[in-house]
Amino acid sequence: MKKVLILSGSPRKNGNSDMLCDEFEKGATEAGHKVEKIRIAEKKIGYCRACYACKETGVCAIKDDMAEILQKMIDADVLVLASPVYFYSIDAQLKTLIDRTVARWLEVKDKEFYYIVTAADEELSSADTTLACFRGYAACVEGAKEMGAICGMGTYEKGEIKSKSAMIEAYEMGKRV
């Protein structure tokens, strides 16, 4: 049994990328893994101030929900990063969370990574920079292994993902954890 942590960057509850997270969670749970999904938009996470107090103490100077989330990231075997494409990149919610891992970033190691992306654009290449952002973070994680990516393209309105093959793909990817 693996500990799976899904970090849903979608600002819309039950938005397209959030729905894909739910399908991934369903598959991974059915496969016998312990799964937790965190909707980042529902958490209080401030921006990194580059004060580097954490360099001295190992603890971030900002007192918010990030310390608890970062501990869960450290404890997880699998990290799922999910974001809608915003101007060809990840959204601010997920970027803020990633930046805040700096306090204990060396402790986030030996993780399997899965990526979930949704975009209004139909062209798969529109997800390239978003995936590059995910991969950029994973490149900073010692022992990181990319295990899969789902791109739900052509999904702008809430719920459009339901008619896309990405729903089945997300469930199946979760089953393969």
Image (cartoon, rainbow, N blue to C red):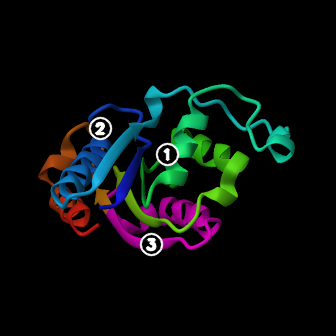
Residue bearing mark 1? 72
10 Å crowding of disc 2: few (<14), some (14-19), many (20+) = many
Q: Residue at x 21, y 51 (%)?
A: 23
What amino acid is labelled 3 in the image? Glu
State the SS at label 3. Answer: strand
Please provide percent x and percent y for residue 118: 35, 52
Q: Which mark is residue 144?
A: none
Q: Residue at x 59, y 31 (%)?
A: 45
Cα separation between marks 2 and 1: 24 Å
What amino acid is labelled 1 in the image? Lys
Q: Is residue 91 visible?
A: no
Depth-wise, is mark 3 or mark 1 nearer the camera? Answer: 1
Please provide percent x and percent y for residue 96: 61, 41
Q: Find residue 107 and report its image quarter.
A: bottom right
Q: Residue at x 25, y 65 (%)?
A: 173
| N-term-proximal mark, 3 vs 2 | 2
Quadrant where the C terminus sits is bottom left
Depth-wise, is mark 3 or mark 2 nearer the camera? Answer: 3
Image height check: is 52 above or below 163? above
What amino acid is labelled 2 in the image? Gly
Image height check: is 54 above or below 62? below
Q: Work out whether residue 11 or residue 4 is closer to the camera in this orientation and state it.
A: 4
| N-term-proximal mark, 3 vs 1 | 1
Q: Is 141 within the magenta?
A: yes
Q: What is the magenta range? A: 121-150
| N-term-proximal mark, 2 vs 1 | 2
Residue bearing mark 3? 146
Q: Residue furthest front?
A: 1
Q: Which mark is residue 15?
A: 2
